[in-house]
Amino acid sequence: MNENEKRIITVLNQRGPSTRKEISAACGISWAAAVKLVNRLSAQGMIRCLGESTQKTENGKTSRIYDIAELQPLAIGIDIEYGHTTITAQNLKYRLYYSEIAATPQNPTMEEVVVFLAGLVERCRKDLAGRNLWVEGVGVGIPGLLIPSGGPPFDRVADALSRACSLPVVADNNIRAYTLYLQKQSGNGGSFAVFIIRKGIGAGITLGGKLFRGYSGLAGELGHLPIDSEGPRCRCGKRGCVEAYFNQREIARSWAEAAGISRLAGQEEQDERRLVEELFSEAAEGNPRALSLLKEKAAYLVPAIAGLLLSFDIENIMISGHFGPRGEVLIPILNEGLAQAVSSRFHYSLNYRQIKNEGFAIGATMLFLNKYYDYTVLAEH
């Protein structure tokens, strides 16, 4: 698929059904090129004609309207979390054709992960085949520290799973998978970064519309920036990392202690989220105890954001977590800290996005389907 074909797919996915004239203008290509490429994509089954437009052109004729096809291509997306794994099958419009949740193996070797994933893929393909549906590839979002040894697991998992399933596989950090989901949701064809706060902190970065992975696929691990060598031990083995101070569990624990709650019932995730949402809600209402705690915790996140700003000079930065509908109260607190840490010459915008759990599975699908897109077109036109 050439670059202009990718632009057409991207425009149709973001803007919806369009005429060839609208496609030509949005993609910055000539009318003749738009007609040729639309015909080619239609013949390949990638897009479909919906019929005639109700609006007439200047010469009194009607134009045909085109949209992305429903069944081609389909891809499998697998979102691996430490507790459970979600597998889906979706099309370019992210319509769901299959979904399953399974328990993730604990402390697995790479071989165990691949066997587990291959079983999920086989069940999914069997179900789809019964409906005469076929997938073109697999995307896998996986935590970088799920497999404890051997370096970043992404390419190793992709290669091994591809051999096991006889399908092309793209694997990457689940934070970067979610970054692709946010890119699609926001229609951002330029550069932006997102800090995702759950059990830890990860940063996803796009530069000029392209996902940035770094030399070894480790870009964005700013949660493991050490800020206190005597601080609590992080899951990476070091002490005093940013994410050891600012993560969902630690925030919930600190608020429970400040609010006089004796314990978190089993440290269940729903309890953590409830407490975190309560903290942000109380802070938004002006509760001085909640505001003080949030400012204390946010101070640990500021160095990581400042490091990204100083390194990449990215204007648009998102903060995403399970903070509830009042999560935006964190933004002015962070801005106050960044004003002390970063020169006023840097111009940036912080905003809050509540995590959408389905975004990780959609993003995993996009790791594979991303080869059909060119988001730079959204920044140009």
Image (spheres, rainbow, N blue to C red):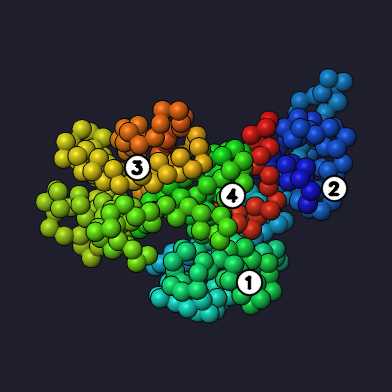
Nearest to N terminus: mark 1 or mark 4: 1
Of the residues tagged 3 and 2, which is closer to the observer? 3
Of tags 1 and 3, which is closer to the observer? 3
Helix, strand or loop at mark 1: helix
**CB atoms at circles 2 and 4 under 8 Å apart?**
no
Q: Are marks 1 and 4 in contact (CB under 8 Å)?
A: no
Amino acid on which the number 3 mark rests in the picture: Val
Q: As displayed, is residue 61 above or below residue 120? A: above
Identify which amino acid the numbered label 1 is placed on. Answer: Asp
Tell me the amino acid under the disc marked 2. Arg
The disc at residue 211 is 4
- Looking at the image, tell me whether mark 2 or mark 4 is earlier in sequence order: 2
| Label 4: how many Cα within 10 Å (few below 14, some 14–19, many 20+) | many
Circle 3 sits on which residue?
302
Q: CA distance from mark 2 to mark 4?
A: 28 Å
Helix, strand or loop under label 4: strand
Amino acid beneath label 4: Leu
The nearer-to-camera label among 2 and 4 is 4
Q: Which residue is mark 1?
A: 159
Figure quadrant of residue 266: bottom left
Q: CA distance from mark 2 to mark 1?
A: 32 Å
Q: Position of residue 174 (x, y in %)?
A: 50, 58
Q: Nearer the viewer, residue 353 or 63?
A: 353
Quadrant that contains the C terminus: top right
Mark 2 or 1: the one toward you: 1
